[in-house]
Image (spheres, rainbow, N blue to C red):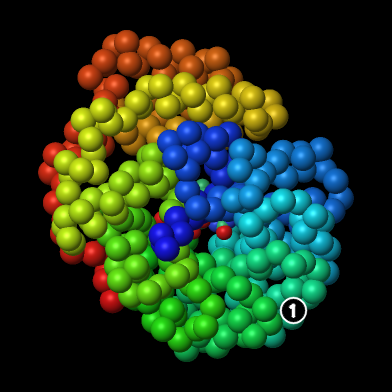
């Protein structure tokens, strides 16, 4: 069975418009939604319907809940239980000060009992697959992390995603993938690994490694999927290349001639169109800026274009900036990233166990 490829939950990014874009390139196994406030969902805020939109593939959706109250998270899970989806996830990893100070996100990792009781409670309110996304705690103490995860497992968590950085590290330092591999050895539940997967090559290599080791938890990708919404499809092709070449990733097989240049300009335009169709106007600007903040990395002129986009006050202005850039620099249509691929080689896994 193929190693599951999971789209990471990312606030202001993992929404329907972005999923439509990824799905258009071939999709992934499961789409985690951006974190949704349990309290907001229960109070029926004006934007909740947008957060609950599980399109275009509701059966692949994993709704992520965020909150500080076990009672509210359990009640929100009961609401989500009635929707078609692949599962419900609890956010125990978000290090953002506002979230943590409120007692939500990574704050749950401070107490094994608190987190255990939360899972026990949510477990009773849903039959969907229940998962938890965590970090490596506050100090990186592996023994504590293991006790914490064992308790989650005992209380009925069916999948744990580990982003192996401490809460204080935010996105600094390198993700400690050895924690993922050690945790997998110790737990009965599958563990998905997440953090710093840089491109389709790395995703394919990690998938081949996991398949070889019988690891079932899957691989979760965040920022690289925004830079390359085609990453999952390309990694699958690389995996096929791996089989054909008996262990060596073959660039020729994975990147057939017709797909040599990703449609960078067209993808940006398509995203703007999807955003207008699948998100409320109040969200357009923040979400467009978030997306292009990563997607512009396909361009040699990345920072210049990001700045121009950030100065715009609407989708029409962003579209003008985007189109003008390719009129002035047609060589950018193929994307910086893919020109760099000529240097591709099948090196060893970064941070292999
Ligand atoms: C813009 C942004 C928003 C994020 N929002 C969430 C979130 O809502 N819930 C969550 O569990 N993690 C969130 N994360 C963390 C990611 O899910 C992921 O763990 C992290 O980006 C590391 O993976 P990557 O290196 O593949 O990006 C967010 C990360 C980014 C960059």
Q: Residue at x 76, y 71 (%)?
A: 122
Q: Position of residue 198 (x, y in %)?
A: 32, 52
Q: Position of residue 27 (x, y in %)?
A: 47, 43
Total labels drawn? 1
Viewer can see residue 169: no
Q: Is residue 185 left or right of residue 137?
A: left
Viewer can see residue 153: yes
Q: Nearer the viewer, residue 169 or 273?
A: 273
Q: Is residue 159 left or right of residue 246?
A: right
Q: Residue at x 76, y 51 (%)?
A: 83
Q: Position of residue 98 (x, y in %)?
A: 65, 57
Vertically, is 12 above or below 65?
A: above
Q: Nearer the viewer, residue 334 or 142?
A: 334
Residue holding disc 1: 120
Q: Is residue 246 left or right of residue 72?
A: left
Vertically, is 310 above or below 3?
A: above
Q: Residue at x 50, y 83 (%)?
A: 187
Vertically, is 151 above or below 85?
A: below
Q: Position of residue 46 (x, y in %)?
A: 81, 38
Q: Quadrant for the C terminus, please.
A: bottom left
Q: Residue at x 29, y 67 (%)?
A: 209
Rendering quarter of residue 220 = bottom left
Q: Quadrant for the N terminus, please.
A: bottom left
**Does dot 1 land on a helix, a strand or a loop?**
helix
Crowd band around label 1 with a 10 angstrom C-alpha radius: few (<14), some (14–19), many (20+): many
Q: Nearer the viewer, residue 270 or 177?
A: 270
């Amino acid at each position: 069975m193929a190693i599951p490829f999971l789209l990471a939950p990312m606030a202001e990014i993992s929404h329907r418009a972005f999923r439509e874009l990824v799905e258009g390139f071939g999709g992934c196994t499961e789409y985690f939604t951006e974190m949704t406030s349990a309290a907001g969902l229960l109070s029926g805020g004006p934007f909740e319907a947008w957060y609950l939109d599980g399109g275009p593939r509701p059966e692949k959706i994993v709704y992520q809940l965020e909150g500080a109250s076990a009672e509210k998270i359990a009640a929100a899970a009961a609401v989500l239980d009635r929707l078609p989806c692949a599962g419900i996830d609890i956010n125990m990893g978000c290090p953002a000060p506002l979230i943590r100070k409120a007692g939500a996100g990574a704050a749950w990792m401070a107490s094994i009992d608190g987190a255990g009781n939360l899972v026990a409670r949510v477990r009773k309110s849903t039959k969907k697959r229940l998962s938890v996304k965590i970090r490596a705690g506050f100090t990186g103490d592996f023994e504590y992390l293991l006790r914490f995860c064992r308790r989650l497992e005992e209380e009925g968590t069916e999948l744990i995603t580990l982003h192996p950085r401490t809460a204080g590290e935010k996105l600094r330092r390198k993700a400690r993938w050895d924690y993922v591999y050690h945790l997998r050895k110790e737990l009965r539940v599958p563990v998905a690994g997440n953090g710093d997967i840089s491109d389709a090559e790395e995703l394919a290599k990690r998938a081949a490694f996991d398949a070889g080791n019988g690891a079932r938890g899957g691989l979760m990708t965040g920022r690289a999927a925004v830079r390359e919404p085609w990453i999952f499809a390309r990694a699958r092709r690389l995996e096929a290349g791996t089989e054909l070449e008996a262990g060596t990733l073959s660039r020729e097989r994975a990147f057939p001639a017709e797909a040599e240049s990703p449609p960078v300009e067209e993808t940006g335009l398509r995203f703007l169109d999807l955003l207008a169709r699948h998100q409320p106007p109040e969200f357009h600007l923040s979400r467009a800026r978030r997306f292009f903040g990563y997607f512009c990395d396909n361009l040699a002129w990345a920072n210049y274009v990001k700045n121009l986009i950030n100065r715009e006050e609407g989708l029409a202005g962003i579209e003008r900036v985007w189109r003008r850039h390719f009129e002035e620099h047609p060589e950018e249509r193929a994307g910086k990233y893919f020109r760099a691929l000529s240097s591709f080689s099948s090196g060893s896994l970064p941070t292999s166990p």
